[in-house]
Structure formats: structure tokens, C-alpha cells
Image: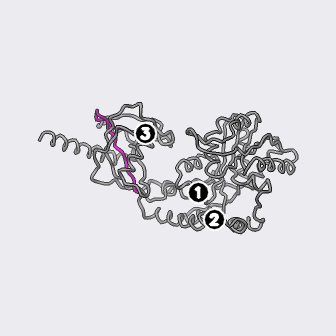
């Protein structure tokens, strides 16, 4: 499946027919799948929400929902041939579900009345469609480490319905995160899809733009006319989004992202290396990451350590390499995904005096870790990281020598 990258989000360059063919494959598969519908507003949100960004990039299909994505792709030197709105594609799946007799569950809407009204109207439109359940879900919020609904019986009700397809309309980012964290608890569901406010359209609570405006990609104008209160959201999805795209394009050619690397050593003098989780290679490296806006490099390196390794206590910065490690990203793909020409890294040395029981890896970042002796740091690290590994080792040896000289004097 072809894709383009817009502000770091992978968007599937797929037609409605091709996507529907994939749905058939998904429903016959033993595995579970989910479809997301990124538009400019969602892409902007993912720029400041790392977990949403990961979820969007892990989706089986990311439908290009919005003319702004096609324009953005062209500005970024790519070509997005297709545009498939979530509402239209949901209708296509419903038509196929009616023909194949796939049971469907509707989840979301402003309230229970809306979800019930949407179910009633869809049953009237698709006479043989099996809608086996509907619910608003109530209040959706993050509790006890997960996105949950106030409807305590919701998961049980969905399981008892034996639905194979579930449409989730909680709005972004709640719907994406709810699916990602709860889909595995619904064993009969083969496909979940985010649908935003589509259930409100089907229920007759909100009106879609006329066909001509939808064809021209001017649904945003229609929404502004009928809901002036959405001005800020529409401004972000049009003007702010395009400005970010232009900035992204410029950065790819000229700008290096500020980055920090954490060379963590223990009291034995061994260094902590992590194995990246986003590749099948034996990619060992030091914990590292970008510096956020308004954040010092010292704050950034401690945050990266906390996020990637779970280490929060018994760690302190003991030094910083005098030189920066600057490199270009190896491929155009990396540049389009990250929005920079490359990175310039400051290497910090940190001492960890705790025990391994407090090391809890972020499964999205790393799948394992090892404490490696100084002489094995360079051989262990991935080929693309060896230059930095040489800097770490040389800098630490100089630091150790200075420390010994001070102690001796």
C-alpha cells in the first residue's frame, strides 16, 4: 500500500475501492485491524500528542480525509492521488456489511438518543443490515492508565453482541486511543474504524455539506457557515495547518533538530543501551530524543530517560560532551517522517545508582536493554550510531582521567 508522510503522519494513498478490498481481507483474517481517518486537524493534534501519532502510524489504513492533505502532500514534494472521507467510507462498509451479513456495532454520538436514532435510520436505509448494538459510551476519559467510558458494561455488551465491525465516534483523540487500548478485549471484532461526528450526521442531528461543496473539498466552509463557533478549529485546520506544512518543507532542507543523547552509566562503569522496538534490526543505541519547545537540554535528557527507561530516581547528570554530534537523516523517508534535515545532538553523561527493578521500558521505544562494558559499547551499537558511540567512549575516558587527576591531587 502506497503512503505519503504529512507532518510525520503516514497517510495511505488509497482509493475507496482499494480500501474496501482491504476491508474484505480484514474480515476474513484471524487478526484484528483498525482504520483511522486523519484530516488536517487530526494531523495537527498528533504533532503535540506523541501517543496519538504512534497510534495513527500503527493503523492498518489511514484514510486521506480532507482536501488539505492533498495540498500538503504536494507542498512536501509528494503526490496524494486519492481522498476518501470517513463518512463516505463508512457508508461503503455498511453497504458491504449488508451484502455479507457482517454484524455491526455503533459507538459514539452526542448521547444515547443520537446513537439510537442513527441505528434506526441506518436500519431503515439498509433493510438487511445487521446492527447488533449501539451506545454513546457516556463520558470518555483517561482513568487508571487507560481510556475508558462511563458505561461500565460497554465492553461486555459489545462482546455479547458478537459484532465483527465497530464504528467509534468519540472524536479525536479519544476514539483513536480507546480503540488502541480496548480492541484486544473484543475478540469477535475484526475491524474497528474511527468515524468522528459521522453518527450525528446519520442521526440527523447535524447536516453534511451539499455534494458539490464536498466534491470541491469545501466542507470546512459549510461547517463555518452553520457553526460559527467552530471558527478556531477551522482556522487551525486550514491556515495554521498550511503554515506548519510550509515550515516542515523548509526544515527538511535546512534545519537540524535539537536532540539529546543519554549515556547512562552505573556504579560498575557499564553503560545502558536499549534495543529499538520499531525495527527488526539489532538496533542498539543510547536513549535519545528531541528537545521540546521551552525545555532546556538538561530537562530534555532527563525527560527522555524517564520516558524511554522509566528511571525517575537515583539518576543525575555528571557531565556533558564538549562537542556536538551532527548528522543528516539517512533517507528522504526519515526526513519526511521527522520534518528535519537531520539532528544535532548533545551527549550527556548520567550516573544511575538504583537497581534494575526500576527500569521499565516504553514498549513503543525499546524492546530490551543491556548494561554493556565501556570496551563493548562501540561494537554493540548499531552502525549508524557508531560515530556517536566513539564520542561517548572518548569523552567518558577523558572525564574519568580528569576525575582521577583531581582525586589524586
Question: Mark 2 = which residue?
Answer: 234
Asked if residue 20 lies left or right of residue 362, the reply is: right
Residue visible at 38% across and 41% down?
A: 381
Residue 328 higher or lower than 219, as above or below: above
Task: Pinpoint residue 314: horizontal percent, then vertical percent.
Answer: 34, 37
The residue lying toward the viewer, choosing from 24 and 289, is: 289
- On the image, numbered disc 3 is attached to which residue? 309
Main SS of residues in magenta: strand
Identify the residue at horizontal 57%, vertical 64% (top origin): 241
Q: CA distance from mark 3 to mark 2?
A: 38 Å
Extent of the magenta region: 258-274
Quarter location, residue 201 = bottom right
Provide the secondary structure element on which disc 2 rests.
helix
Give me the C-alpha separation between circle 1 and circle 3.
27 Å
Mark drawn on residue 43: 1
Residue 261, percent across and down?
37, 48
User: 151 or 186, which lies in front?
Assistant: 151
Q: Is residue 137 magenta?
A: no
Q: Relative to 109, is 56 on the left or the right?
A: left
Residue located 70% across and 42% down the image? 191
Amino acid at each position: 500500500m502506497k503512503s505519503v508522510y504529512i507532518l510525520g503522519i503516514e497517510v495511505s494513498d488509497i482509493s475507496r475501492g482499494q480500501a474496501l478490498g482491504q476491508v474484505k481481507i480484514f474480515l476474513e483474517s484471524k487478526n484484528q485491524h483498525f482504520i483511522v481517518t486523519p484530516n488536517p486537524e487530526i494531523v495537527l493534534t498528533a504533532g503535540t500528542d506523541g501517543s496519538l501519532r504512534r497510534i495513527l502510524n500503527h493503523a492498518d489504513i489511514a484514510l486521506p480525509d480532507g482536501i488539505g492533505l492533498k495540498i500538503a502532500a504536494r507542498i512536501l514534494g509528494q503526490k496524494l492521488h486519492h481522498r476518501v472521507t470517513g463518512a463516505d467510507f463508512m457508508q461503503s462498509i455498511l453497504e458491504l456489511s449488508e451484502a455479507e451479513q457482517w454484524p455491526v456495532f455503533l459507538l459514539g454520538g452526542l448521547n444515547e438518543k443520537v446513537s439510537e436514532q442513527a441505528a434506526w435510520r441506518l436500519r431503515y436505509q439498509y433493510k438487511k443490515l445487521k446492527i447488533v448494538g449501539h451506545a454513546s459510551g457516556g463520558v470518555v476519559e483517561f482513568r487508571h492508565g487507560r481510556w475508558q467510558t462511563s458505561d461500565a458494561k460497554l465492553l461486555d455488551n459489545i462482546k455479547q453482541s458478537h459484532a465483527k465491525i465497530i464504528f467509534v465516534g468519540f472524536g479525536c483523540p479519544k476514539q483513536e486511543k480507546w480503540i488502541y487500548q480496548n480492541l484486544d478485549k473484543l475478540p469477535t471484532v475484526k475491524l474497528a474504524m474511527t468515524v468522528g461526528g459521522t453518527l450525528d450526521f446519520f442521526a440527523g442531528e447535524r447536516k453534511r455539506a451539499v455534494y458539490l461543496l464536498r466534491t470541491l473539498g469545501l466542507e470546512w466552509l459549510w461547517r463555518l457557515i452553520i457553526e460559527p463557533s467552530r471558527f478556531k478549529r477551522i482556522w487551525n485546520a486550514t491556515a495554521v495547518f498550511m503554515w506548519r506544512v510550509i515550515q516542515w518543507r523548509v526544515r527538511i532542507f535546512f534545519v537540524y533538530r535539537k536532540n539529546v543523547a543519554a549515556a547512562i552509566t552505573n556504579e560498575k562503569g557499564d553503560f545502558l543501551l536499549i534495543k529499538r522496538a520499531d525495527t527488526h534490526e539489532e538496533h542498539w543505541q543510547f536513549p535519545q530524543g528531541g528537545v521540546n519547545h521551552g525545555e532546556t537540554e538538561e530537562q530534555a535528557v532527563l525527560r527522555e530517560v524517564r520516558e524511554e527507561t522509566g528511571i525517575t530516581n537515583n539518576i543525575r547528570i555528571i557531565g556533558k560532551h564538549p562537542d556536538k554530534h551532527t548528522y543528516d537523516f539517512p533517507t528522504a523517508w526519515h526526513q519526511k517522517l521527522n520534518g528535519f534535515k537531520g539532528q544535532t545532538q548533545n551527549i550527556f553523561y548520567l550516573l544511575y545508582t538504583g537497581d534494575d527493578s526500576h527500569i521499565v521500558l516504553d514498549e513503543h521505544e525499546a524492546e530490551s536493554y543491556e548494561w554493556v562494558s565501556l570496551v563493548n559499547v562501540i561494537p554493540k551499537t548499531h552502525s549508524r550510531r557508531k560515530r556517536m558511540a566513539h564520542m561517548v567512549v572518548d569523552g567518558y575516558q577523558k572525564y574519568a582521567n580528569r576525575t582521577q587527576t583531581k582525586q589524586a591531587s
